[in-house]
Amino acid sequence: MGLLDKITGRAKKAAGDVTGDSGLRREGRQEERKGEAKDELAQAQNRADDKADEVANLERKTN
């Protein structure tokens, strides 16, 4: 999910390093962090879905 953001962020950081453009480097870091945040959100959503499934299974067993 956030892989594209991470890749473009790294590319911008590298371009900023090569050209000496600190603004481009900063933009790349921010985009990379955005990709990481998207990945963390997806993992949290997956954990929540897993717990919801676990609860549903337990409810079926007790009813």
Image (cartoon, rainbow, N blue to C red):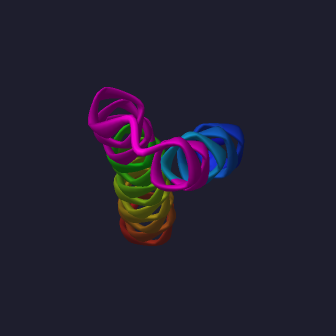
Q: Is 22 one of the magenta-colored residues?
A: yes
Q: Nearer the viewer, residue 11 or 21?
A: 21
Horizontally, residue 30 falls left or right of residue 60, namely left
Instruction: Locate the N terminus by quadrant.
Output: top right
Above or below — where is 33 with respect to 51?
above
The residue at 51%/65% (across/down) is 57
The residue at 53%/42% (across/down) is 19
Q: Position of residue 58 (x, y in %)?
A: 40, 70
Q: Nearer the viewer, residue 42 or 13?
A: 13
Above or below — where is 60 with respect to 13?
below
Give the magenta-colored segment's residue range.
Answer: 14-31
Q: Position of residue 27 (x, y in %)?
A: 36, 30
Q: Position of residue 42 (x, y in %)?
A: 48, 48
Q: Is 61 one of the magenta-colored residues?
A: no
Can you tell which quarter of the image residue 62 is in? bottom left
Q: Position of residue 24 (x, y in %)?
A: 41, 31
Above or below — where is 51 with respect to 24?
below
